[in-house]
């Protein structure tokens, strides 16, 4: 029987090994799988390469993962946050690596990685420092840079509703990187607000087909990053 | 505001209103973070714009009323927003396909520097201790059909932002169409900066004195 459900966040992330590449969904707090990230901190994997658009807020979620020394390298588009100096402090001390990628290029690299496309050309970043050292080729008279697909060992994402086969729907702008990160990882771990029987999600409404999902954790009442930051919470 | 430059010329709201006048009815518009966000308040009577926010929403509405916000319904600046009837959500790769492939009509961005050939610098000063952060700016300027810049004419220290050559790292080369400042509306033409409008009580000599490149006023002559 196909049953993609684990009972706890802890059990779902215990296979994440030191040195793994981990994609973490979310744009700011929208779609951030905080409970899975906190379980990963508890699990204690280190030397991780983490792919996310940002570098977290306050001292919880992704910022806490970085602050707890789990992350060797960030691949992201916007590592600045008004309410967190965790990444900035480590970066200035040369204690964390940064691969800065334009946001759309980051998204397309993830989609390509999850789609069996090893590389692609894009007009984004042509003529800027972020294109330095990259192959440039003209198509229809316009220069494009070569970018490589991005894959991960694990993805941690958040959805709104999941069924037994791993079909997913999302909530508003929390969708962001979820669908493409689900495709790009060897093992995709999802935290869902609701878990339903097969057939309860209309097949026309499925956003991520279950083939891209490996483990599901039900977190009916997930924490919100901004509320934890406002309360001054640090994790652990 | 302690800066005396704020006392003359257009206010930020005036600038935003002026930008909105130039956006055609039916446009799909992406507004950058900061002053560009004000443009949404000044849609001219009889026009309808659809706002795209690159984190995955077409049909972005106004800010929610107090207490009615949703932490997972936000814009690219991570502020809480609402949706209009007819809105749609989509993932990041689709959102940037809309941007990269020219499906978005107009993007309004802030600037650190704009050069007379339309180069835009708005993501990094290149300072060694700065944390580099680019977000979606490079994708927007590479893909959106028309790029408008809305910015104060000078920096807080009085340095010109409109220059002959950008000294900051570029966001994109030759991408800006028109610049709206507190002093003037200026087109980027093949011949350079051309003033197409002046704020009330501002004269051209004053604008030139605040600009780091030569301003053209008459329509450029076409050499044959």
Image (cartoon, coloured by chain):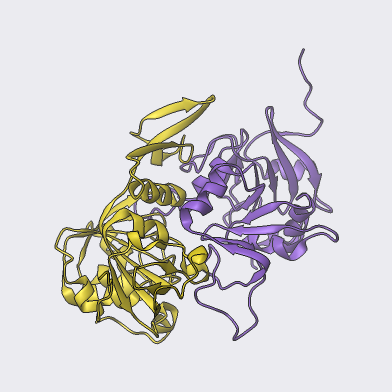
Above or below, comparing residue B196 to residue B83 in the picture? above
Q: Nearer the viewer, residue B206 or B184?
A: B184
Q: Position of residue A89 (x, y in %)?
A: 29, 65
Question: Is residue A95 in sight in this rendering?
Answer: no
B33 horizontally vs A177: left or right? right
Residue at 36% x, 30% y: name it. Answer: A135
Residue at 74% x, 51% y: name it. Answer: B183
Q: Nearer the viewer, residue B97 or A199?
A: A199
Residue at 33% x, 80% y: name it. Answer: A218
A16 horizontally vs B47: left or right? left
B155 horizontally vs A42: left or right? right
Please identify which colour was used for chain B in the image.
purple
Q: Quadrant of residue A5?
A: bottom left
Q: For the N terminus of chain A, which image quadrant?
A: bottom left
A20 horizontally vs A133: left or right? left
For the image shown, how many numbered marks are present on the structure? 0
Q: Nearer the viewer, residue A97 or B83?
A: B83
Tell me which chain appears yellow: A
Above or below, comparing residue B4 to residue A9 in the picture? above
Q: Position of residue A53 (x, y in %)?
A: 40, 59
Hey, which residue is sitting farthest top in the picture?
B224
Q: Nearer the viewer, residue A149 or A2?
A: A2
Q: Quadrant of residue B34?
A: bottom right
Q: Position of residue B206 (x, y in %)?
A: 75, 45
Q: For the C terminus of chain A, which image quadrant?
A: bottom left
């Amino acid at each position: 029987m196909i049953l993609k459900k684990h009972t706890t966040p802890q059990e779902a992330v215990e296979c994440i090994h030191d040195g793994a590449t981990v994609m973490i969904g979310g744009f700011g707090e929208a779609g951030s799988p905080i409970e899975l990230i906190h379980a990963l901190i508890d699990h204690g994997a280190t030397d991780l390469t983490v792919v996310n658009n940002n570098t977290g807020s306050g001292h919880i979620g992704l910022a806490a993962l970085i602050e707890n020394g789990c992350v060797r390298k960030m691949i992201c588009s916007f590592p600045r946050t008004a309410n967190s100096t965790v990444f900035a402090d480590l970066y200035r001390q040369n204690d964390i690596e940064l691969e800065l990628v334009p946001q759309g290029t980051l998204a397309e690299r993830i989609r390509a990685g999850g789609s069996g496309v090893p590389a692609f050309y894009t007009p984004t970043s042509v003529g800027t420092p972020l294109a330095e050292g990259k192959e440039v080729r003209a198509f229809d008279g316009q220069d494009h840079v070569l970018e490589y697909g991005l894959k991960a060992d694990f993805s941690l994402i958040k959805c709104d509703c999941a069924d037994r086969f791993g079909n997913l729907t999302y909530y508003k702008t929390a969708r962001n990187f979820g669908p493409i990160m689900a495709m790009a990882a060897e093992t995709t771990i999802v935290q869902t607000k609701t878990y339903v029987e097969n057939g309860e999600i209309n097949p026309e409404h499925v956003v991520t087909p279950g083939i891209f999902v490996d483990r599901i954790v039900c977190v009916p009442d997930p924490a919100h990053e901004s509320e934890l930051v406002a309360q001054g919470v640090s994790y652990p | 505001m302690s800066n005396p430059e704020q006392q003359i010329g257009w206010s930020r709201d005036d600038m935003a209103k002026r930008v909105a006048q130039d956006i055609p009815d039916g446009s799909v518009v992406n507004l950058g973070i900061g002053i560009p966000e004000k443009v949404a308040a000044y849609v001219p009577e009889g026009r309808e714009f659809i706002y795209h926010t690159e984190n995955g929403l077409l049909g972005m509405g106004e800010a929610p009323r107090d207490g009615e916000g949703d932490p997972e319904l936000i814009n690219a600046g991570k502020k809480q927003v609402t949706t209009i009837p007819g809105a749609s959500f989509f993932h990041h790769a689709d959102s940037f396909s809309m941007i990269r492939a020219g499906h978005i009509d107009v993007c309004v961005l802030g600037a650190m520097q704009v050069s007379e050939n339309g180069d835009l610098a708005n993501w990094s000063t290149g300072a060694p201790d700065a944390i580099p952060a680019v977000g979606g700016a490079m994708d927007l300027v590479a893909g959106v059909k028309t790029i408008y810049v809305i910015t104060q004419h000078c920096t807080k220290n009085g340095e010109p932002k409109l220059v002959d050559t950008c000294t900051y790292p570029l966001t994109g080369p030759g991408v800006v169409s028109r610049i709206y400042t507190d002093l003037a509306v200026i087109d980027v033409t093949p011949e350079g900066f051309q003033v197409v409008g002046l704020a009330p009580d501002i004269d051209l000599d004053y604008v030139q004195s605040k600009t780091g490149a030569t301003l053209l006023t008459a329509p450029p002559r076409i050499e044959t």
